[in-house]
Image: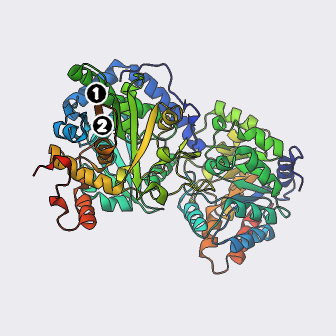
Amino acid sequence: MSTHVASVEHRFGPFGGQYVPETLMPALAELEQAWIEARLDPGYREQLDGLLRDYVGRSTPLYLAERLSEVAGRTIYLKREDLNHTGAHKINNALGQALLARRMGKTRIIAETGAGQHGVASATACALLGLECIVYMGEEDIRRQKPNVERMELLGARVAPVTAGARTLKEAVSEAIRDWVTNVGDTHYIIGSAVGPAPYPSIVRDLQRLIGDEARAQVLEREGRLPDRVIACVGGGSNAIGMFAGFQHDEDVALIGVEAAGEGLESGRHGAPLTVGGRPGVLHGSLSLIMQDEEGQVTEAHSVSAGLDYPGSGPEHAWLRESGRATYVAVGDHDALRAFRTVAQLEGIIPALEPSHALHYVLTEPTDSTLDVVCLSGRGDKDLAEVIAQLRELEGPDALHRRDHPGAGA
Amino acid sequence: MSTTTTNAGAERIAAAFREHGRRAALMPYLMAGFPDDATARAIGQAYADGGADLVELGVPFSDPLADGPVIHEAGTRALAAGSTVDAVLRQCEALAPRVPVVLMCYAQLVLARGADAFARQLADAGGSGLIVPDLPMEEAAALLPACEEHGIALVPLVAPTTPDERLGRIGAEARGFLYTVSVVGTTGERAALADQFGSIVARAKAATDVPVALGFGIATPEQARQAADAGADGVIVGSRLVREAGEAADPAAAVRAVVRGLADGLEH
C-alpha cells in the first residue's frame, strides 16, 4: 500500500480496459471509487496492515538459499510467500478485497480458483469477516486439488463445480463473472489474479506490491545492493506483478516472468501467452495477450500446475513485455516437477508447483547475474499427491529417492 | 453486394420495427451452427416462416459472459460441430434476403478480425446490425465508426443497473434499436418478471429516439405480450428457442411453431 495516486489505471499501454456486459459497468465504477477512497483511508489501511502483520504473519522473510546458490553458482534469495497464513501470496489480495467489500456493504463474496490457493484465501478472509463465500472451481481442478477443496468447505465456503470446457480456471472465471452479472447488487467478486476488467488489475497489483516492496528493502539490507534479477512465476500474474512493482523503476534490475510451457511450446499444450506473444485478445474483461486460434476463439491452456493453467495473463504484464521492461520465458511440466523435488531436497522447502517453474529456470538457465531474488509464491502441500504420482509415472517407483541434482553429495 | 450505402442497416432495421403489423416487432435469437450448420440454416428459415420480423444471429464463442447455461451450451456444441465466423457469415447471407439480420458477437471475435474487416464482411453478408454484448460504450471507439462506414447499425445494450445519465449517453449513440436488458443477469428463461417491464421500458424510451427492444428472460407468448403492453417496440426471445432447437426431433418445425405462438401473442 505504498502508492497513492488519484486515479486507477484502465489501460497499460494498449492493454486493459473493461470488456464486460453493461450490467456490470456501474459495479466497476462503484468498485473503483471505493478503492480510491479506501486506499487513502487510514482506517482501512490500519485494519489491513494489522491483519497482514498479526493474522497473515507479514512481513515474510527473504531467505538466502545457500544450497540452491551453490548449485546455481550465484546468490539466490527466496521471498517466502509460502510462509503466509494459508500458504501463498493470495491471502494479501483476498484480505484486502474482502475488507473493501465489507466497506462497500456487500454481504456475498464470489471467487474463482484454479489451484485452490485463492479459493482458500477468499474462504479464510470471509470466515474472518463473517461474509458468505462461494468459490467457482473447475471439476478437473477439484480433482487435482482435493485438500484445498476440503479446506474451503471447512472454512464455511461453498465450492461450486464448473463443468464447461476444460473444467479448469478459465471456465471458473467465466462462471464467476456470470454469477456476478446476476447478483451484482449484494455481491463482490474477489478476482484472484492481476486480470479482469479495470480496476481489478490495478487493485490486485496494489494489494500485492508489498511482496516487491518488502523484498527490495530486505535485499538492500542484506546485500547492500539491488539484485540483478527478480524472477516470479506467471499464471494470471499476481505474485509476479506484486514482485515486479517493487523493482519496476530500478532499471538495472531485470524482471523475469516464468510461464508454464506445459508439454512444450510447440505442442500448443501450454500456458505461456506472454512467452509466445502473438495477437492481443479479450478474455475475462480485458485486452491482453491470450492464447487463441485463428478465429479468435480462446484456446485451452495446459500445465501440470493448476495455478498456471490459464490462457491469458494480466494486461500490465502484456505491457511490461511489449515495452521491453520485463522478459517472459516458459518452463515445462517435467522440469517443474523435478525442480519441486530438487528444492525440497536441497533446502527442506516444499515449493508449490507454480514457483517450481521459476525455480527450475533459476537453477538451470545460464546467466551473468550474480544475485537473484525469486518469489516463492506458495507452498507445495496442495500439490504433493499429484507431484508424487506424476514423478513416479515419469521416473518409476523410486522417483522420490533420486538425487540427481549437483548438490546431492555422494 | 453493395456495402457502402450509409445507414443501410439502420434503415432496414427501422423499417422492420415500423412495418411489423403487430404490437411489437418479434426478434428471435438463433445460435448459428447449432446443433449443426445445416439445421441452423433451416431454423433461420423457420423463424422467418413463423413470423420473425428480424433475426438475432448469435456467433458461438468459447467464453460467453453475458449468456446463461442454455446459450452457453449451444455455443459450445456449435463450436464442437465446427462452426466458424465465416460459416456464420454465410448463414447470415442466406437469411438476410428474407429478414434483417442482427449479428450478436462477443468482442474478442470482432477484434480478432479487426473492427473494419468485421464490419465490412458483415455488410457483404447482408447483415444489418451488430450487437457486441461485452463492448460497453467506453470500448466501442474503434468499432462504431467502422460500422458507420459500412452501413451496419451498432446496437448497444442497457441494463436495469445502468444509471440515468449513462442511459442517456448510450441512448444517444444507439443505432438501429436500443437493446434493453429486462433483468439483472444473464440470458435465460424466467418465470415471472413482467411487473418490472413498465419502468424498464419507460426509462429506455425516454433515453433514445430509436426503437426499444426488450430481451433476456422473455420466453412465452404471454411475456411477449406483456413486453408490448409495457411499450416495447420489439421483443427478443432467445433461450426458449435455443432449448427447443436442442431438444426437438425436428428442430425447424418445432421452432416454427414456437415463433408463430410468440407472434400470435403480439397480435392486436
Chain at numbered mark 1: A
Q: In the image, is B53 to the left or to the right of A181?
A: right
Q: Is residue A258 visible?
A: yes
Q: In the image, is A121 to the left or to the right of B253?
A: left
Q: Quadrant of residue A2?
A: top left
- Tell me the quadrant of the picture where the N terminus of chain A can be found: top left
Q: CA distance from mark 1 to mark 2?
A: 9 Å
Q: Quadrant of residue B210?
A: top right
Farthest-out residue, left: A410
**Residue A375's mark?**
2
Q: In the image, is B217 to the left or to the right of A224?
A: right
- The image shows residue A206 at horizontal and vertical percentages of 40, 29
The kind of secondary structure element at disc 1 is helix
Mark 1 = which residue? A215
Above/below status of A379 relative to A221 = below
Above/below status of B131 relative to A144 = above
Mark 1 or 2, nearer chain start: 1
In this rendering, do the residues under marks 1 and 2 share a single chain? yes
The kind of secondary structure element at disc 2 is strand
Q: Looking at this view, is A304 or A4 the one in front?
A: A304
Q: Is residue A154 visible?
A: no
Chain at numbered mark 2: A
- The image shows residue A160 at horizontal and vertical percentages of 38, 57
Dot 1 and dot 2 residues touching (CB under 8 Å): yes
Q: Looking at this view, is B209 or A345 the one in front?
A: A345
Q: Residue at x 32, y 40 (%)?
A: A90
Q: Amino acid at mark 1?
A: Ala
